[in-house]
Image: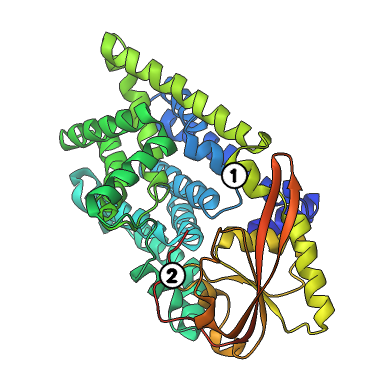
């Protein structure tokens, strides 16, 4: 995602559009790939329906304007599947190698790409008609290409205590409601917003149908089931401990769009299914429109979270300059706050979050920061949200930064931390 932002800001300038242009273009390419994948697997109508379904899925629509790893993650997942389907139908080596290259980029975008490799391997191993490919060199060369693409990640981790993989094995909890049932219910509720309340159920119905048809020998549905079931099942099971976020299985759910599009002619004559699909589509369109409009409504939480950072960043820069010590760094609780400050301060100072496990370690080695001073800024109320007294030898609270927004005054709390002691050995609640 960093490389994506570097390219797009170089093309159109260091602006919000420059930062967000990459996801916009990637979403467009993903939609075209979704169309052609469903067209090749089924027919042109299925392709059009799958592409349209992608556009009105809330997680895909919102992900198209957020510079987060999900945009390249989903793009390269779909591209790898598109190449694989071309490979198995045409037998051409370039398609296999394209699948390997795209799969490697998928994993470099997000570690959940491991499920893509596992799903494709399962499809080749356990679907009888596909085992013939195991006697050919192309799949193994594709796997080698994927590993080559991922090698820089492995090499970096070998020099940094395998911190990326430690984060994978010991993830921070997304939510902590003090009970597995409540945490799983929150995951389901959030998923209903991410994918649409009705379409979430319809996609799961498409998964069940794909599994059934795949077992009967339809390799098209077998592939889609293999691409969806492992990741969806894993996040569903682990949702009871509050770890997975609802957008983690996004590519798995999106892989069910071609299946749902292909199944539509079979069920559209049934009044119940027709009404459910119509209601699901209408509701999704409404959700997407509302989500797009929220940042423009001054009183909405989305608008409030985006406003005031330019003025707050200017005040932080003035505080550092007044102290005449460029070694001061800026600390935030969340990576979202750190990204806002990084944009407006143009990374003139070191800015890092420390609100979740390993976040500060991913950016730098805490030992190198010992005894340095920091400015901590947050809009959390009433407390800072971090045990600053355990992180610094001395903490001083400064007057709040007050910023006038369209809906009133937004306040940022500011603390000066003297002598960084390191990360506290206590659990810090993540965002």
Front-most of residues 137 and 80: 80
> Can residue 91 be seen in this snapshot?
no
Which residue corresponds to the image point at 50% horizontal and 85% vertical from the top-left?
Answer: 159
- Vertical placement of residue 407 versus 7, above or below: above
Q: Which mark is drawn over residue 26?
A: 1
Q: Which mark is drawn over residue 428?
A: 2
* Residue farthest left in this picture: 216
Q: Image quadrant for the N terminus?
A: bottom right
Q: Position of residue 335 (x, y in %)?
A: 57, 62
Q: Tell me which label, 2 or 1, sits earlier in the chain.
A: 1
On screen, residue 24 versus residue 184, left or right, reads right
Which residue corresponds to the image point at 51% horizontal and 59% vertical from the top-left?
Answer: 109
Single out the mark in the foreground, 2 or 1.
2
Neighbor class of circle 1 (other Cα within 10 Å; few <14, some 14-19, many 20+) is many
Asked where in the image residue 266 lies, by quadrant, the reply is top left
Element carrying mark 1: helix
């Amino acid at each position: 995602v960093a490389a994506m932002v570097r390219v797009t800001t170089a093309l159109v300038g260091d602006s919000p559009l420059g930062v967000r242009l990459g996801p916009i273009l990637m979403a467009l390419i993903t939609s075209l790939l979704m169309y052609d994948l469903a067209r090749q697997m089924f027919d042109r109508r299925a392709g059009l329906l799958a592409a349209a379904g992608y556009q009105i899925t809330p997680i895909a629509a919102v992900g198209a304007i957020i510079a987060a790893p999900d945009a390249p993650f989903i793009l390269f997942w779909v591209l790898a599947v598109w190449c694989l389907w071309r490979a198995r139908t045409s037998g051409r080596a370039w398609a296999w190698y394209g699948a390997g290259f795209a799969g490697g980029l998928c994993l470099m975008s997000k570690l959940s790409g491991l499920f893509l490799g596992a799903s494709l391997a399962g499809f080749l191993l356990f679907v009888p008609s596909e085992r013939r490919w195991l006697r050919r060199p192309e799949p193994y060369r594709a796997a080698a290409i994927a590993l080559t693409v991922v090698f820089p990640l492995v090499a970096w981790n070998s020099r940094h205590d395998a911190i990326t993989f430690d984060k994978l094995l010991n993830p921070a909890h997304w939510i902590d409601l003090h009970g597995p049932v409540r945490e799983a219910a929150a995951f389901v509720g959030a998923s209903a917003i991410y994918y649409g309340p009705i379409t979430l159920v319809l996609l799961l119905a498409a998964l069940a149908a794909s599994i059934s048809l795949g077992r009967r020998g339809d390799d098209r549905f077998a592939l889609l089931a293999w691409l969806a079931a492992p990741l969806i099942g894993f996040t569903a099971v682990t949702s009871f401990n509050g770890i997975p976020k609802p957008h983690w299985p996004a590519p798995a759910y999106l892989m069910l769009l071609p299946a749902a599009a292909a199944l539509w002619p079979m069920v559209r004559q049934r009044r119940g299914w027709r009404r459910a699909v119509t209601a699901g589509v209408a509701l999704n369109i409404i959700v997407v429109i509302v989500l797009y409009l929220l940042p423009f409504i001054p009183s909405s939480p989305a608008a409030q979270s985006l406003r005031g950072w330019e003025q707050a960043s200017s005040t932080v820069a003035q505080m550092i300059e007044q102290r005449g010590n460029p070694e001061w760094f800026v600390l935030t609780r969340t990576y979202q706050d750190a990204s806002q400050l990084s944009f407006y301060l143009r990374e003139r100072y070191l800015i890092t979050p420390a609100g979740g496990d390993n976040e500060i370690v991913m950016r730098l080695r805490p030992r190198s920061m010992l005894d340095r001073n920091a400015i901590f800024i947050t809009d959390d109320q009433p407390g800072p949200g971090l045990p600053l007294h355990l992180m610094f030898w001395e903490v001083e609270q400064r007057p709040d930064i007050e910023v006038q927004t369209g809906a009133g005054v937004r306040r940022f709390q500011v603390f000066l931390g003297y002598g960084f002691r390191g990360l506290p050995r206590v659990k810090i609640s993540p965002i």
